[in-house]
């Protein structure tokens, strides 16, 4: 028996699609046959370029602007996507606000906590409220949140980011229990410090200190993250829900 990831006939929304990880996820899902809704916040030119690239792969695509921290903006994005290419079967929550310079709890600006909460927690609440109802009506769906190994590490100076991602984890685990009866799966992918196109351009793929802590002794790649997203988006993962899947070479290992 051979296995393949077939997303033909599916519509996938990726928030933060113009980012370092988002664009690789978009290409990967399109390569599996999905049509793509490409969310962007301010990078319209990058979104238009990515849309054109996705269309060369034979997929339909639309680029849609929204502020994922604002519910009205997310609802407008939903309506625009539905009108352009149909209601998404797959939602990948990848957008995140610019990470502030990390500092200790005692020194971190209070606004940083609020910003990360809106970006990680309310972002996912807004997407769920906007897109899950149509999935439930169809009796199937895939929701994939992009988390981080930092949520488990809780290292010094990571408090605003780690707290927001841990809050996101709580929302999505509860959501998995609430919508499972509709055959909607809700999972999270948690990358480690991932090699991206920016790293390749700058020659910064390697960091000896970090790699020494990773059991596989290297950093992962953006494509390796995208592969796991594609798997969770597919029917191959139809009985997996509520999972937090580290893709970090073993740098963090959830306990049982």
Image: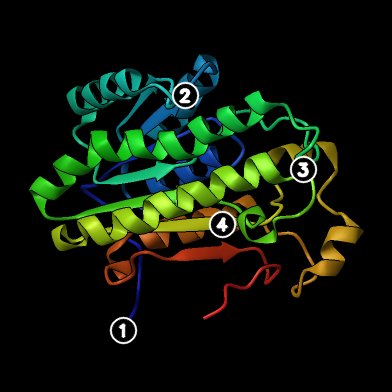
Residue indicated by mark 4:
190
Residue indicated by mark 2:
40
Question: Where is residue 110 shown, x and y percent of the image?
Answer: 66, 27
Q: What is the distance, in whole Å, between disc 4 and disc 2 at their CAs?
A: 21 Å
- Asked if residue 208 lies left or right of residue 65, the reply is right
Residue 109's quadrant in the figure?
top right
Q: What is the distance, in whole Å, between disc 1 and disc 2 at their CAs?
A: 39 Å
Q: Which mark is residue 90?
A: none
Labelled pair 4, 2 in contact (Cβ < 8 Å): no
Q: What is the distance, in whole Å, between disc 1 and disc 3 at their CAs?
A: 37 Å
- Badge 3 marks a residue whose secondary structure is helix
Frontmost of labels 4 and 3 is: 4
In the image, residue 69 sits, relative to residue 158, either above or below, namely: above
**Does label 1 or label 2 sit earlier along the sequence?**
1
Q: Which mark is residue 1?
A: 1
Question: Where is residue 117 shown, x and y percent of the image?
Answer: 53, 35
Residue farthest to the front, as pictured: 106
Residue indicated by mark 3:
200
**Does label 4 or label 3 sit earlier along the sequence?**
4
Frontmost of labels 4 and 1 is: 4
- Badge 1 marks a residue whose secondary structure is loop
Q: Residue at x 53, y 30 (%)?
A: 18
Question: Where is residue 103 shown, x and y percent of the image?
Answer: 80, 37
Frontmost of labels 1 and 2 is: 2
Q: What is the distance, in whole Å, between disc 4 and disc 1 at their CAs?
A: 30 Å
Decide which of 17, 150 is in the foreground and name it: 150
Mark 4 crowd level (few <14, some 14–19, many ≥20, 10 Å Cα): many
Mark 1 crowd level (few <14, some 14–19, many ≥20, 10 Å Cα): few
Frontmost of labels 2 and 3 is: 2
């Amino acid at each position: 028996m051979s296995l393949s990831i077939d997303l033909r006939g599916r519509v996938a929304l990726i928030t933060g699609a113009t980012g370092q990880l988002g664009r690789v996820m978009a290409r990967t899902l399109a390569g599996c046959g999905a049509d793509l809704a490409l969310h962007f916040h301010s990078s319209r030119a990058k979104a238009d370029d990515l849309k054109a690239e996705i269309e060369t792969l034979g997929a339909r695509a639309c680029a849609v602007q929204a502020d994922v921290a604002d519910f009205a903006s997310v609802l407008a994005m939903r309506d625009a996507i539905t009108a352009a290419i149909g209601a998404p079967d797959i939602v990948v929550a990848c957008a995140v606000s610019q990470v502030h310079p990390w500092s200790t709890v005692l020194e971190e600006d209070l606004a940083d906590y609020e910003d990360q909460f809106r970006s990680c927690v309310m972002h996912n609440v807004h997407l769920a409220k906007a897109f899950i109802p149509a999935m439930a009506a169809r009796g199937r769906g895939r929701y994939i949140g992009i988390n981080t190994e930092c949520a488990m590490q809780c290292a010094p100076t990571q408090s605003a980011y780690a707290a927001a991602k841990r809050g996101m984890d709580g929302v999505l685990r509860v959501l998995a229990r609430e919508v499972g009866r509709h055959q909607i799966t809700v999972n999270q992918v948690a990358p480690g410090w991932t090699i991206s196109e920016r790293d390749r351009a700058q020659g910064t793929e390697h960091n000896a200190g970090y790699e020494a802590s990773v059991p596989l002794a290297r950093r992962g790649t953006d494509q390796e993250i995208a592969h796991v997203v594609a798997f969770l988006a597919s029917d191959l993962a139809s009985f997996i829900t509520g999972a937090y899947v580290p893709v970090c070479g073993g740098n963090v290992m959830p306990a049982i």
